[in-house]
Structures are given as C-alpha cells and as structure tokens.
Image (tube, rainbow, N blue to C red):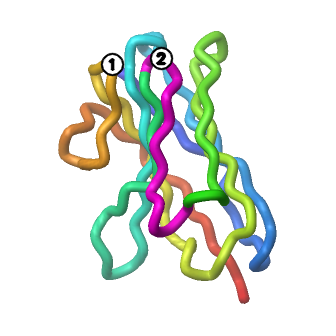
Amino acid sequence: QVQLVESGGGLVQAGGSLRLSCSASGRTISNYAMGWFRQAPGKEREFVGCISVSGVTINNRDSVQGRFTISRDNAKNTVYLQMNSLKPEDTAIYYCAARSSLYCTRRPDDNDYWGQGTQVTVSS
C-alpha cells in the first residue's frame, strides 16, 4: 500500500505560482510512475501531467504545457508540481496518483493509489 498526501494548495492571484507536493509513505515511490490530476466542480477528473520511473515527464499540452512542471525526489519520497502563470481556469482540486508501472498514464482509472487532494483557487 502507498499512502499519498498532497500539500501546497491555496488561493493565488492570476499570474502567480504555487508548488504542490505529494508525499508518499508505505513504500518507496522509486518503483512507481506518478501523476497529477485535477477536478473542477461539475467536471470530470483531468490529466495534468505525470512522470515515469526514469524521470520522463508528460504534460497535458492543451491546458498546462509550458506552465506546469513535474519533478520527483525519490530520496524524499515526494513528487512535485510547480505551477507558474496560473489562470482562473486552473482552479480545481489537485490529486496525486501512483501507478505500479515504469510508465505513467493519462487515464485516471489506470492509477493504483490516490491522495485526498489539495484545493487550488486562482482569482482573476
């Protein structure tokens, strides 16, 4: 079992930045592909980005390309989501996910473990 806890969310003005953290316990995340997803009220859970075991990252090109960056620190058992140039449409609950695979996935259902989420609100 892997327990995931997100932190770092909050209220920020448009154009600002936040860094989300996802701290894992129970097992080392070095063997897991890690992903970030978000869900706005009334909408389906959306892929934000992910990072494979080897460190290859994939972002949602349509919504966050060039603004969000994912990284991992296996020594700290933590994954990060650096969010810059935030927009009001980035407002959502952000979730961290772990997949028992070398490779990450855009599909929420293909992940094995989830955190409880952290709220990000971007004001205009």
Residue neighbourhood size for the residue with mark 2, other residues' Cα within 10 Å, grouped as few (<14), some (14–19), many (≥20): few
- Answer with left or right where residue 14 lies relative to residue 115: right
105 up-or-down from 107: above or below: above
- In the image, the segment drawn in magenta is 53-64
Would residue 76 be counted in the magenta stretch? no
The spot of residue 90 in percent (x, y) is: 56, 72
Q: Quadrant of the N terminus?
A: top left
Mark 1, residue position: 102
Picture quadrant where residue 32 is located: top left
Mark 2, residue position: 54
17 up-or-down from 97: above or below: below
Q: Nearer the viewer, residue 114 or 70?
A: 70
34 up-or-down from 13: above or below: above
The spot of residue 48 in percent (x, y) is: 46, 55
Which of marks 1 and 2 precedes in the sequence?
2
Query: Quick one: which residue is furthest to the left in this view?
Result: 109
Amino acid on which the number 1 mark rests in the picture: Leu
The residues bearing labels 2 and 1 have C-alpha atoms spaced at a distance of: 7 Å
- Answer with left or right where residue 19 lies relative to residue 121: right
Would residue 63 be counted in the magenta stretch? yes
Which secondary structure lies at badge 1? loop
Q: Quadrant of the C terminus?
A: bottom right
CB atoms of marks 2 and 1 within 8 Å: yes
Q: Residue at x 49, y 56 (%)?
A: 94
- Answer with left or right where residue 65 lies relative to residue 29: right
Residue neighbourhood size for the residue with mark 1, other residues' Cα within 10 Å, grouped as few (<14), some (14–19), many (≥20): some
Amino acid on which the number 2 mark rests in the picture: Ser
Q: Residue at x 32, y 26 (%)?
A: 103
Q: Residue at x 39, y 12 (%)?
A: 31
Which secondary structure lies at badge 2? loop
Q: Residue at x 33, y 18 (%)?
A: 102
Picture quadrant where residue 62 is located: bottom left
